[in-house]
Amino acid sequence: MKPTNKLTVPDLISIGVFTALYFVLVTIATFSSAALFPGFNNVVLPAVCALISGSVYMLLAAKLQKFGGISVMGIVMGMFFMTSGHFIVSFAANIVMGIVADFVAKAGSYKSRKGLLFSYVLFSYGLFGPVLPMWFMKDAYVANLEARGKDAVYIAELFANINMGTFVFAVVATLVCALIGGWFGQKMIKKHFVKAGIV
């Protein structure tokens, strides 16, 4: 049979597995950020996720080598954030960055190390979706929290460190952590999976 560029059922199963692994890492990053950086957890969350999730992303790209896998992972994560009470921008950020990242990876045939690294950086910025409204949609975000029964003390503590300085920090930290996480993921794949013939 000729290889196809279309996603097959086994491909979708693989995407589901990698997306589940990515979701687990995002969950770990969420709880660890809250424990290690109280008051700054929303600021550092995208960076922490980017730091620890590179191996899953790079393995998905290397194993699938087809357009759509990265996009689907971004869409699924976006849908989760949207259905869990976050703003619509949560979905938009994940789907847009997922598709853009997929195109970048495809441009290098999913084999260019620099292309995949850049792709991962872009994908990592999709995780700004759930927290971006805190900086640029504060009134709507506060109204949403109040509608969910959050009191003024909780809201004040949540926004205590939300300013343009922390936004710039979050953007730069995510870039640095995504580069490190993606590089580490590529090293892990080369050392353990390529030699074993898995990818």
Image (cartoon, grey):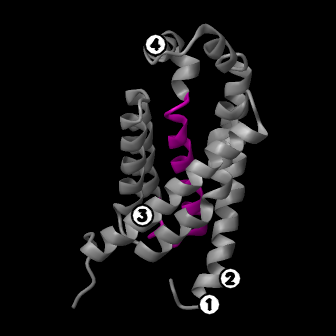
Whether residue 146 sits left or right of residue 96 in the image: it is right
Mark 2 and mark 1 in contact? Answer it, CB < 8 Å: yes
Q: Earlier in the sequence, mark 3 or mark 2?
A: 3
Give the spatial CA distance, label 3 vs label 2.
Answer: 23 Å
Placement of 94 over or under 117, stated as above or below: above
- Residue under numbered circle 4: 140
Residue at 41% from the left image edge and 73% from the top image edge: 64
Give the magenta range.
Answer: 105-131
Give the structural element (helix, strand or loop) at label 2: helix
Give the spatial CA distance, label 1 vs label 3.
Answer: 23 Å
Percent position of residue 17, x then y: 42, 67
- Residue under numbered circle 1: 195
Residue situated in front as seen by the camera: 9 or 126 = 9
Give the structural element (helix, strand or loop) at label 4: helix
* Amino acid at dot 4: Ala
Mark 1 and mark 3 in contact? Answer it, CB < 8 Å: no
Whether residue 34 sits left or right of residue 123 in the image: it is right
Q: Which mark is residue 191?
A: 2
**How many residues crowd mark 3 within 10 Å: few (<14), some (14–19), many (20+)?**
many
Residue at 60% from the left image edge and 68% from the top image edge: 113
Give the spatial CA distance, label 4 vs label 1.
Answer: 51 Å
Q: Earlier in the sequence, mark 2 or mark 4?
A: 4
